[in-house]
């Protein structure tokens, strides 16, 4: 099956529609359906404040079903705290209004080699279980005539991380955004992350990590890949 953004999913060599699989069949697999974050067409018709009110109501109901005493001083404010955290912090990257504003500058230094911003710490959340993904992103590009402020590289990573994510999608979203902003194919993104859905539940493997990468343009050559990997080694 091919999605509008060109992404294809193949199972045993054949194009497959993910909707044919049940939730149990997908299970804990690292499964996703495309590069774009799945959002409803009317995702932003409700204001942030109204979303917080609704989330607080629903989370209070979850806590009540779990048997927690919401009249307790420690728990009483939890639904509102969770709602604020969801909208203003850990899932703020869902809303386009929070996309970082990026200014480009002329490459007056005529620096033609790769620029690498490494060890960008990020916190995201697995879209399958809503538990944290914690990792580091390494971002590189070669100027096509323009350069970007270093802090903006961090902000772009954070923007796409602050939403329910799958690591493969996060990697591609950062790379595609940088390619569009910098008007170049010469972009690379490497992400090394730990998934709490693996370490704190399910298989409970606390030692494994997941590495994903995107190599575009001249970065998609053995020499440049080796050069970049040498730069990001601790």
Image (cartoon, helix red, strand yellow):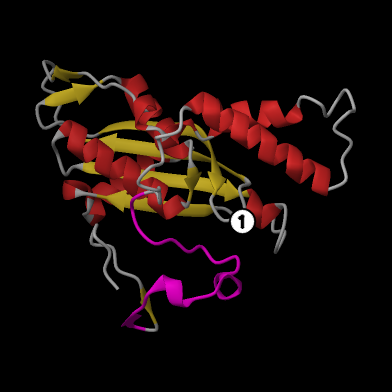
Q: Picture quarter containing residue 156?
A: top left
- Packing grade of label 1 (10 A; few <14, some 14-19, many >=20) is few
Picture layout, residue 47 above or below residue 7: above
The image shows residue 204 at horizontal and vertical percentages of 72, 59
Picture layout, residue 108 above or below residue 165: above
Residue in the picture at 68% in, 53% down: 199
Picture layout, residue 176 above or below residue 86: below
Q: Is residue 134 magenta?
A: no
Q: As drawn, is 52 to the left or to the right of 102?
A: right
Q: Is residue 85 visible?
A: no
Q: As drawn, is 226 to the left or to the right of 145?
A: right
From the image, tell me which residue sits under label 1: 208
Q: As drawn, is 51 to the left or to the right of 148?
A: right
Q: Is residue 73 visible?
A: yes
Q: Indicate the quadrant containing the N terminus: top left, top right, bottom left or bottom right.
A: bottom left
Q: Main secondary structure of the magenta part?
A: loop
The image shows residue 132 at horizontal and vertical percentages of 61, 43
119 and 60: which is toward the camera: 60
Residue in the picture at 14% in, 39% down: 184
221 and 52: which is toward the camera: 52
Residue in the picture at 66% in, 31% down: 82
192 and 230: which is toward the camera: 192
Residue in the picture at 41% in, 54% down: 168
Q: Is residue 25 magenta?
A: yes
Query: What kind of element bears circle 1?
Result: loop
The image shows residue 47 at horizontal and vertical percentages of 46, 28
Magenta residues span 13-36
Picture layout, residue 114 above or below residue 220: above
């Amino acid at each position: 099956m091919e999605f509008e953004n060109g992404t294809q999913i193949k199972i045993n060599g054949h194009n497959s529609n993910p909707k044919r699989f049940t939730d149990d069949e997908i299970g804990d697999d690292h499964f996703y359906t495309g590069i774009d974050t799945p959002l409803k067409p009317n995702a932003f018709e409700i204001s942030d404040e109204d979303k917080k009110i609704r989330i607080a109501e629903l989370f209070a109901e979850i806590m009540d079903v779990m048997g927690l005493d919401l009249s307790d001083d420690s728990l009483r404010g939890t639904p509102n705290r969770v709602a604020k955290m969801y909208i203003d912090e850990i899932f703020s990257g869902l809303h386009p209004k929070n996309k970082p504003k990026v200014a480009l500058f002329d490459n007056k230094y005529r620096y033609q080699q790769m620029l690498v911003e490494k060890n960008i710490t990020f916190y995201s959340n697995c879209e399958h279980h809503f538990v944290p993904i914690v990792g580091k992103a390494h971002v590189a590009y070669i100027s096509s005539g323009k350069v970007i402020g270093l802090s903006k590289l961090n902000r772009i990573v954070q923007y796409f991380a602050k939403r329910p994510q799958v690591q493969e999608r996060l990697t591609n979203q950062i790379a595609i955004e940088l390619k569009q902003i910098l008007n170049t194919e010469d972009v690379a993104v490497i992400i090394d992350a730990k998934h709490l859905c693996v370490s704190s539940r399910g298989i409970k493997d606390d030692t494994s990590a997941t590495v994903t990468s995107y190599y575009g343009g001249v970065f998609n050559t053995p020499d440049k890949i080796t050069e970049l990997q040498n730069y990001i080694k601790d």
